[in-house]
Image (cartoon, rainbow, N blue to C red):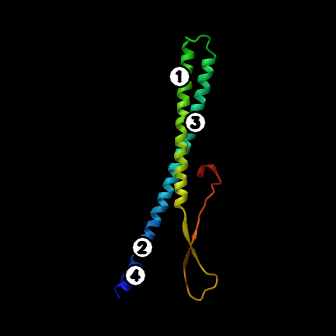
Amino acid sequence: MKSIFLILFLGLVLPKPCLAQEAQDRTYIQELVKQSEKQRSTGLKMMAFGGGAVALGLLLAASSDDWTDGAFGGGILLAGAGSLTALIGIPVLAGSANKARRAASLSITTARLAPAQSVYRSSGAIPSLTFSLPLNSKNR
């Protein structure tokens, strides 16, 4: 008798927190996607600026006539700083991909299954995997 009351109590109490948790998960997924987009754009910008700085530094160093010239030293420093900036952009991109993977793994949900012809109203849940494909670059 106690087990019946326990099962009934758990059946009435547990669905409510599960539904509330679904809304929190959805906002957490959206936040992870936003963070991933920001990190991705930051990483790409760092790599682009770093590559440009390396190219400019090497051009500056190559155009110098003397090893003791300030342009040669400045070019080497600019190329070194640019290469460090580009190298730092790589872990930022990896972190972005990690957050995107985490958001994708959290988006695995259950979908409601409605029978085509049913005598009584029943809602069963089947496991489903949700994927979204961004069609324009602004929403990625």
Q: Position of residue 5 (x, y in %)?
A: 36, 84
Residue identifier under label 1: 77
Q: Which mark's residue is nearer the viewer, 2 or 4?
A: 4
Type of amino acid at the residue the image marks with label 3: Met
Q: Earlier in the sequence, mark 2 or mark 4?
A: 4
Type of amino acid at the residue the image marks with label 1: Leu
Residue identifier under label 4: 7
Residue identifier under label 2: 16
Q: Say if mark 1 contacts mark 2, CB within 8 Å.
A: no
Q: Label 2, label 4: how many angstroms apart (C-alpha)? A: 15 Å
Type of amino acid at the residue the image marks with label 4: Ile
Q: Position of residue 47 (x, y in %)?
A: 57, 36
The residue closer to the viewer here, 106 or 49, is 106
Q: Residues within 10 Å of mark 3 (few under 14, many from 20)?
A: many
Q: Residues within 10 Å of mark 4 (few under 14, many from 20)?
A: few
Q: Residue at x 62, y 11 (%)?
A: 65
Q: Earlier in the sequence, mark 2 or mark 3?
A: 2
Q: Label 3, label 4: how many angstroms apart (C-alpha)? A: 57 Å
User: Residue 35, which numbered label?
Assistant: none
Q: Quadrant of residue 4?
A: bottom left
Reply above or below: 107 against 44.
below
Q: In what element is the residue under mark 3?
A: helix
Q: Position of residue 19 (x, y in %)?
A: 45, 70
Q: Which mark's residue is nearer the viewer, 4 or 1?
A: 4
Residue identifier under label 3: 47
